[in-house]
Amino acid sequence: METFFQVNRYLHITAGFIGFFVAPVALAVRKGGAAHRRWGRVFFWAMAVAGLTALVGAQHIHSLFLLLTAVFSLYMACFGYRSLYLKHLAWDAEVAPFDWAVAGVGLAVFLGTVGYALVARNIPVGVFGAIGAMTAARQLRGYANAGHWAKNQWLRNHISGFLASYIAAVSAFSVTSLRFIPFPYNFLWPTLVGVPVIMWWQRRISAQKMHLPAAAVTADTGR
């Protein structure tokens, strides 16, 4: 059994390092191009493997920090990836039960995380929990407003989810490896740096003009 956890640890470290270096590449190349899609998929699967192996490792070493970071990173990576398949919600009001369920469970889990953080007076855990809860709540509100989304809402969700997942990965690396940074700053500095980047991307995307596909035009005109 110890060998299994050792392999799990090496797999987690490898996947984490891949995601750590691939994310800037996906951001740097032309958005929507073949290279962006390829590196984006590599980042998503690296984060998925890193998150799942972190869940296993957290149970072994009894690390609440690793567990919460893994849940947050996994949720945000899936949120960013799933948004690629929700472009139709700009004109279609039909939301899959799966999406409602994931957002609902996510909201419950992150609200529980915030509650724990208040009781334990753990500020970093509360920050991640609050961000996760706000994201899940916005998802549910967005699903309730399906059919009236902005044309580029899916892209804003895509960028926000992947960048938030990356922030969580950097936070985990900082806490476990950058021992010279005192607590809680080792946990929080990636969020302090990353959130303004997300806001910048959000403003940039909001300023872009995007065209609805033919299906949306047909739905709007009734033709």
Image (cartoon, grey):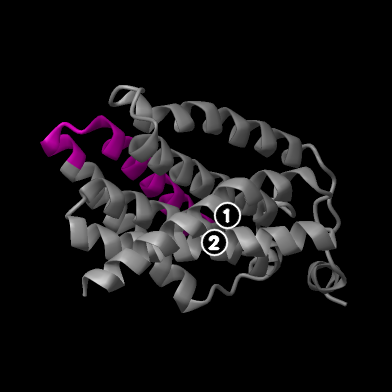
Check the picture and name the quadrant holding the C terminus: bottom right
| Residue 77 in the image, given as x and y percentages of width and height | 52, 58
Residue depicted at 39% across the width and 66% down the height: 52
Earlier along the polypeptide chain: callout 2 or callout 1? 1
Q: Residue at x 41, y 68 (%)?
A: 102
Q: Is residue 69 above or below residue 120?
A: below
Position of 44 relative to 1 (above/below): above
Element assignment for label 1: helix
Query: Main structural element of the magenta stretch: helix, strand or loop?
Result: helix
Chain part drawn in magenta: 117-142
Q: Nearer the viewer, residue 28 or 159?
A: 28
- Looking at the rendered structure, which numbered label has been put on residue 18? 1
Q: Furthest residue to the front?
A: 3
Residue type at tag 1: Ile
**Is residue 124 in sight in this rendering?**
yes
Closer to us: 140 or 39: 39
Question: Please, is residue 213 above or below residue 155 in the view?
Answer: below
Image quarter where the N terminus lies is bottom left
Residue 129 highlighted magenta (yes or no) = yes
Q: Answer left or right for 14 relative to 8.
A: right
Q: Nearer the viewer, residue 222 or 203?
A: 203
What percent of the width, then of the height, locates residue 51?
A: 41, 60
Horizontal side, residue 61 vs residue 5: left or right: left
Q: Quadrant of residue 179?
A: top left
Q: Which residue is mark 2?
A: 46
Q: Is residue 84 magenta?
A: no
Q: Are marks 2 and 1 in contact (CB under 8 Å)?
A: yes
